[in-house]
């Protein structure tokens, strides 16, 4: 089948839609995630200011909070056999970790999807 200019032009919107729909989601804003982590998220109280799992509450917890510096994320919340993916971190933040076999002291947080994306972006900055 010979493609004419007119038939190619008709395919352009479909091609554009396929590219847009297959593009990865935009990464969160790590600076905004740090504000949540240090502030109202209270993440630093358990995970520590640097994410090493050594916050002021960590000594009283068993199992210990995740160390994001190493990283030592030990949960596969989405069942894809990959530990610590963005989806795993997002699920843990949104739903808490108890239902995934994690620390029952980690509650789910009522953050928007954008705020969770920001937190995940910030957590990635903590890796050494």
Image (cartoon, helix red, strand yellow):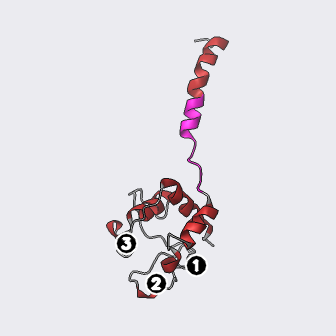
Q: Residues within 10 Å of mark 1 (few under 14, many from 20)?
A: some
Residue 31 lies in what quarter of the image? bottom right
In terms of secondary structure, where does tag 3 sit?
loop
| The stretch drawn in magenta includes residue 60 | no
**Viewer can see residue 101:** yes
Is 117 placed left or right of 5 in the picture? left
Q: Is residue 13 above or below residue 21?
A: above
Residue identifier under label 2: 58
Residue in view at x 58 percent, y 42 percent = 23
Q: Are marks 2 and 3 in contact (CB under 8 Å)?
A: no
The residue to which callout 1 is attached is 49
Q: Which residues are magenta?
A: 16-28
Q: x%, y% of residue 21? A: 54, 37
Q: Quadrant of the N terminus?
A: top right
Residue at the spot 56% in from the left edge and 25% down from the top edge: 14
Query: Nearer the N terminus, badge 2 or badge 3?
Result: 2
Q: CA distance from mark 1 to mark 3?
A: 21 Å
Position of 24 with respect to 105 (left or right) is: right
């Amino acid at each position: 089948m010979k493609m004419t200019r007119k038939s190619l032009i008709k395919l352009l919107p479909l091609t554009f839609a396929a590219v847009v729909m297959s593009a990865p989601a935009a990464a969160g804003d790590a600076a905004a995630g740090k504000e949540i982590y240090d502030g109202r998220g209270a993440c630093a109280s358990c995970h520590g200011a640097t994410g090493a799992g050594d916050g002021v509450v960590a000594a009283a917890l068993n199992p210990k909070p995740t160390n994001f510096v190493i990283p030592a994320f030990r949960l596969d919340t989405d069942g894809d056999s990959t530990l610590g993916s963005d989806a795993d971190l997002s699920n843990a933040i949104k739903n808490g970790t108890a239902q995934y076999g994690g620390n029952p002291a980690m509650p789910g947080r009522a953050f928007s999807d954008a705020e969770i994306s920001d937190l995940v972006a910030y957590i990635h900055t903590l890796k050494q």
